Amino acid sequence: MNILKGEAARAALTRTFSEIPVPDSVLDRNERLFGERLTPEQVVDRILKDVQARGDDALLDWTERLDGFRPDRLEVTADELAAASVAPELHAAIELAISRVRAFYEQQPAHGFLNHGPDGALGQLVRPLGRVGVYVPGGLAPLVSTLIHTAIPAQVAGVPELVVCSPVGRDGDIHPAVLVAARLIGVTRVFRLGGAQAIAALAYGTASVPGVDKIAGPGNLFVVIAKRMVFGQVGIESLPGPTETLVLADDSADARYVAADLLAQAEHLGAEPVLVSTSRELLVAVQAELNGQLEALPEPNRGWARDSVDARMKIVLADTLDEALDLSNVYAPEHLCLLTRDPWSLLGRVQRAGGVFVGESSMEALGDYLAGPSHVMPTGGTARFMSPVNVRDFQNIISVVGINEETLRRVGPAAALLARTEGLEAHARAIESRLNTQG
Ligand SMILES: NC(=O)c1ccc[n+]([C@@H]2O[C@H](COP(=O)([O-])OP(=O)(O)OC[C@H]3O[C@@H](n4cnc5c(N)ncnc54)[C@H](O)[C@@H]3O)[C@@H](O)[C@H]2O)c1
Ligand SMILES: N[C@H](CO)Cc1c[nH]c[nH+]1
Ligand SMILES: [Zn+2]
């Protein structure tokens, strides 16, 4: 594989935000489905408009067309939720993940303040959102962990009502582990819906799916585009799309671990694995390891991972750790994995990333399940301006203004002057009306 250096590396890791790259395989599938090479934006636009116009009928039609399955009922019944079961060890693992994620978010400061001082009272009220939609990907893999990593921060924020959408998977229904997790979390409304049609249902509401105030959760290209398009009608937390991992390693790193961490994310659909190292020997060793570990993976995982490696993997040789960190900050990865001699010494220079995984025993795959922080993190370079899912995503802030009379007399004239400067006479008079009547 081509090793990038210097300006070529910087150019390869610099992302443009004007368009989301569309793999040929997506256009090929669209040609088969629609008879023309529609872009994902065109497909999503059709789906959103159709769901808005025809509600549940459109949801069923699109689910049949895209997922090859027409559910008898979109909503999972209370009896089905209650009956869902998994093996005891898996049940315990789901409970462990829920409790560790909950314990992490209970530490996040997320309260308001109301300060009664010389000016009167000024502050912020913090209120939970009313109804939140949680998208749980399920096209290739039933991401039970994603339900936990999205719903728990919302619950800690105090959101009273969660509505979950997830596509039926390869086994013909939502995976029982997803239903068990929903039950343990206390989610009562789960819908067999994926992709843009799920986002449309949550944004606009239909006869069976309640519209929500905000939609959170990751997904493939279609989910990301749909969330972008419905923003404004509803809130969205961020744009977590196809996953990416940048492993930053020096000559002390173990090539087996580096390869394993890159492949762990490469097996997600559309993933982008990136390796930046100061050691050419390590780069060469990792490539050999990658090939060996890829061959040892079972199908279909080998095929998914090979697609990501062949189509999108980038390998970069940096002169120094400073240059490596600089390139990582330019790329703004969803996951930054530090596999260096003294990884903690690099943390202070990390500027842009969804999450940082420090050292050999903090592999990103562990973070996907139960380290604590949500694995729902910004991708595609949006870590420049967005954050991982967290409690604040599920709260509103309301400003409180309770200025007292004495302060009004002191600051009111300046406010009236600013109003007149803006040409807003009624504003100025509203302020002065109180100044003139107060003794
Ligand atoms: N960034 C994060 O925090 C994070 C976390 C978990 C998962 N992910 C990402 O989520 C993604 C999950 O993708 P997935 O596909 O397995 O599941 P998904 O649930 O996101 O998407 C499946 C849906 O896509 C729709 N779809 C598929 N092909 C289509 C087409 N040609 N036209 C219109 N709609 C189409 C279908 O309706 C299907 O139900 C992966 O890329 C993974 O990396 C990201
Ligand atoms: N790595 C994915 C994106 O952060 C999340 C995930 C869920 N399950 C396994 N992995
Ligand atoms: Zn993962």
Image (tube, grey):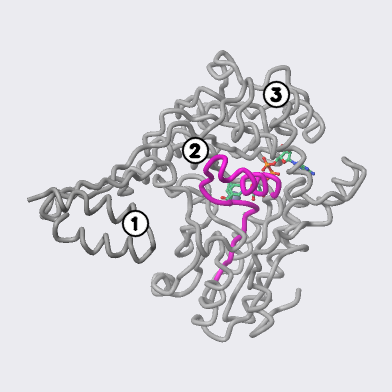
Amino acid type indicated by mark 2? Ile
Kindly identify the residue that appears in the image at 63 percent across and 40 percent down: 137
Mark in the foreground, 2 or 3:
3
Kindly identify the residue that appears in the image at 79 percent across and 57 percent down: 23
Quarter location, residue 207? top right
Residue 387 lies within the magenta run: no
Kindly identify the residue that appears in the image at 59 percent across and 33 percent down: 202
The residue identified by callout 2 is: 148
Q: Is residue 11 above or below residue 53?
A: below
Rounded to the nearest angstrom, the CA distance separating label 3 from label 1 is: 51 Å
Query: Which mark is first along the chain, 3 or 2?
Result: 3
**Nearer to me, 169 or 299:** 169
Q: SS at mark 2? A: helix
Q: Is residue 208 above or below residue 275?
A: above
Quarter location, residue 227? top right
The residue identified by callout 3 is: 56
Q: Magenta stretch: give its range.
A: 221-248
Amino acid type indicated by mark 1? Glu
Judge the density around disc 1: few (<14), some (14-19), many (≥20) Cα neighbours within 10 Å. Answer: few
Q: SS at mark 3? A: helix
Indicate left or right for 111 with 46 as reference.
Answer: left
The residue identified by callout 1 is: 425
Q: Position of residue 141 (x, y in %)?
A: 67, 40
Mark in the foreground, 2 or 1:
1
Residue 222 lies within the magenta run: yes
Judge the density around disc 2: few (<14), some (14-19), many (≥20) Cα neighbours within 10 Å. Answer: many
Judge the density around disc 3: few (<14), some (14-19), many (≥20) Cα neighbours within 10 Å. Answer: many
Rounded to the nearest angstrom, the CA distance separating label 2 from label 1 is: 53 Å
